[in-house]
Amino acid sequence: MKTDDFAENLEQTQESIEPPHKATERDLARVQQIAQELMVELERLPEGDLVAEVVDNAIKLLRDQTNRGDIKLINKSMKEIRYALRVFAPYRETRKVSIFGSARTPEKDPDYLQAEEFAKGMVSSGWMVITGAGGGIMAAGHGGAGPEPSFGLAIRLPFEQQTNVHIARDKKLINFKYFFTRKLMFVRSSHAVVLFPGGFGTLDEGFEVLTLVQTGKSVPMPIVFIDQPGGSYWKGWMDYAKEHLLGRGFISPTDLRLFKVTDSAAEAVKECVHFYSNYHSVRTIRDDLVMRLHVRPSEAQLKEISKEFADIAVGDGGFRLSGALPMESDEPALDALTRLVFRFNRRDHGRLRMLIDRLNDMA
């Protein structure tokens, strides 16, 4: 079973019973005709072609005789994602950091105080903060940031998860039924991810983000593991990763560059902010990776980059500088940024992170 919890499995089992009658071919043909007329109209609107695909796939659920429980899962998932995107939309241009950690951390614990300090530092740097809206580290993140720059992505659980007082009545609180839609919005909306000590949920969230960045399923971003001052929770995990993951060849040496372990809140803030000091964002256009930069590298710096990172550029084009490309016309606000364009091997994402660090240091 690949659903979120036992209760959800029971609900879907009850709703998987086939209806007393199935749609006839005539019924389906009529619905398809109406849908085709609607899709013609949709395709005349901005982004209407994609909405038409959504409608088309929804109609196919009837043709496939999908049971009611599965349709309900799809419907609720889409509703959660649509609503979350609407909440985040007004703040699209503001960078955000997701904070993960235990819901059980008490208020006087050094981890709690460290999370408060980190959140304050990020807000002072112009960022917003996203947490799971519960207690412990999540409450510390919201408490340090304050409600105005805070988002809460709550999950409905039969135990432990109660919305903290800092975000409880805020319009930026979103309640999710499904873990997978909630995780999607954490990663989709974040420009950095920071983890404090926690249990299975924290480790799950941390490993998922690492996996997404390592495999290129997520854009590059800072991933920071923060211990309490002098603490060893993440330091011990780092030792384990070096001995068992790297030692047995399960990860590459450069994969260790995808994240940072520190016991300093100030150092964690610096890591997140510095990542975007020159690097702005990245986009793949056909076979090319297009990296947007605030500061244009000099010809000497471009030669240096081309030599140092030749191992991740494939083909004969190498690294080249450019202005905005025609296929980026949907992002006119970024037209003034310089582009570093190359054909990335799509494999060495640790080295890609090292390139971003190099460009930031150059600027």
Image: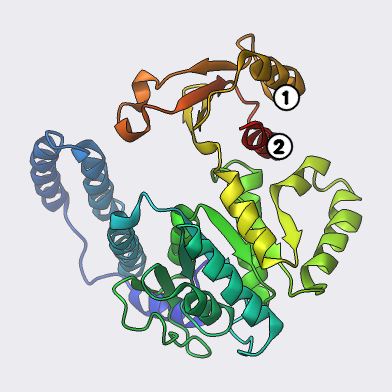
Q: Is residue 78 left or right of residue 38?
A: right
Q: Which residue is mark 1?
A: 309
Asked if residue 207 can be seen in this view, the reply is: no
Query: Which kind of residue does numbered mark 2 sit on?
Result: Met
Name the foreground residue: 178 vs 174.
Answer: 174
Of labels 2 and 1, earlier in sequence is 1
* Vertical comparison of 310 with 361: above or below: above
Q: Position of residue 345 (x, y in %)?
A: 65, 26
Report how far apart the C-alphas of labels 2 and 1 lie in the structure. 9 Å
Query: Which kind of residue does numbered mark 1 sit on?
Result: Phe
Quarter location, residue 249:
top right
Q: Secondary structure at mark 2?
A: helix
> Which residue is depicted at the point 69% across and 22% down?
305
Name the foreground residue: 201 vs 151.
Answer: 151
Q: How many marks?
A: 2
* Vertical comparison of 341 with 147: above or below: above
| Quarter of the figure that contains the N terminus | bottom right
* Vertical comparison of 259 with 290: above or below: below
> Which residue is depicted at the point 59% across and 41% down?
216
Q: Position of residue 156 (x, y in %)?
A: 43, 81
Q: Dot 1, crowdedness within 10 Å: few (<14), some or many (≥20)?
A: some
Q: Position of residue 77 (x, y in %)?
A: 36, 63
* Vertical comparison of 148 with 262: above or below: below
Q: Is residue 25 left or right of residue 187?
A: left
Q: Which residue is mark 2?
A: 354
Q: Are marks 2 and 1 in contact (CB under 8 Å)?
A: yes
> Which residue is depicted at the point 47% across and 67% down?
130
Task: Identify the image's colour scheme: rainbow, by chain, secondary structure or one colour.
Answer: rainbow
Quarter location, residue 199:
bottom right
> Which residue is depicted at the point 80% across and 46% down?
251
Q: Is residue 173 left or right of residue 200?
A: left
Could you say which disc has been placed on residue 97 in the image?
none
